[in-house]
Amino acid sequence: MQHEIGNLLRLALLSLLLQFAPIKHVHAHAQAQAPLKITLAAPGPGSFSYLPIDLIKKIGADQAEGVDLDIRYYAGGPLAASEMLKGNSDFAALGMSALASLYVDNKDVRSIVSISRAPTYVLSVRSELRPHIKTVADLRGRVIGVHSSGKNNKSTSHQLVEFMLQRAGVSPDSANYLSAGQSYADQRAALASGAIDALMGEEPFSSRLAEEGLVYILADLHSETVARQALGGPFLYVQIATRGNLLVQQPEKTKRMVAIMRRVLHWISSHNPDEIARMLHGNNPEALRDSKPLLARSKSAFSPDGTFRREEVATTERFFLNLSKENPKVRGMRLTDFIDARYAGWRE
């Protein structure tokens, strides 16, 4: 009798568990299906330097990490960073040295993942000025277009021009800087109107402007050899940043943002230029014509995994400190002061 009662109790308990198990399963499934909403501010669209950002939605990298990512584009990294610092976005993509300027200005910024390891820029000059501008030093007194220009928050393109002028023995203050935006239409208009004499721009826009005969190339930093000569080593250019308080209060967002970028960078490193170009542009013949040769020669500019490499950080640090040596705020500063590599990691 006691044995039968025990069996009945076990059956009743099993029945109760079976009734609640599906509900629990459905609840867990619903939670897994609810994507985490994240907002990313970035320069672009269509800039080669930020190609991994443009690929996120194309390959579904955000969905694969359980994220609904809203990408908002702006005319330059400092503008994207400003939106992030105002709380209008969770993260921002911009140049590492531009982020360093914000940190020096006491902004609450943290770098969380590396995207590119070369300054993917081309310095070009309006074609009619060819007889007058043959070297970087000849840009003294000229108006140079950069992504965005501010006294305290200089874009990386602005910093690169100043550094190259300095190396050429010319005071960076001897040139004038004008924001030329970060779209092909804006940059072309600035050149065609004569508003700027030269442009520190990115591909594929620079090659297209040269093909049109509007500019000629003065210096191409895509070449690893040229970049090493100009900057002294591999250069940590684009990275993703966030606010320090978001990193503390919402670490899951940072963890997933890093996972998204690592997924994209792995995808780029494992696909050939034709596959990448077609993922970006479909069968658009003009876009494929521009992007495939560029990817063939410059795909290596992107980090293969998003980790912070010490040589790249060291080169970028020297670059930034050299440009900012007159600023007492930078004394003793290191890029590692605001790099948080807990999810991306370090590598020699």
Image: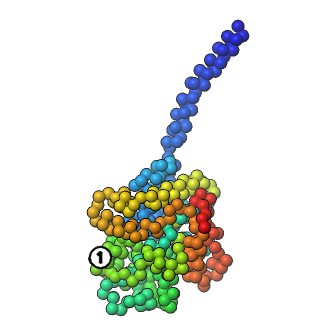
| Rendered position, 252 above or below 218 | above
Q: Tell me residue 113's x, y (percent).
A: 55, 62
Name the residue at 52% across, 73% down: 235
| Rendered position, 251 above or below 228 | above
| Rendered position, 37 above or below 8 | below
Name the residue at 57% across, 29% down: 21
Can residue 326 be spotted in the picture?
A: yes
Instruction: Identify the residue position indicated by label 1 in the image.
Output: 211
Task: Using a 10 Å C-alpha cutoff, classify the residue at mark 1 as few (fewer than 14 neighbours), some (14 to 19) or many (20 or more).
Answer: few
Can residue 88 be spotted in the picture?
A: no
Q: Tell me residue 155's x, y (percent).
A: 49, 74
Name the residue at 38% across, 89% down: 134
Tell whether 129 sits left or right of 301: left
Q: Quadrant of the N terminus?
A: top right
Q: Tell me residue 345's x, y (percent).
A: 60, 61
User: Depth check: 67 or 75 in front?
Assistant: 67
- The total of numbered circles placed on residues is 1
- Quarter of the image for residue 183 reads bottom left
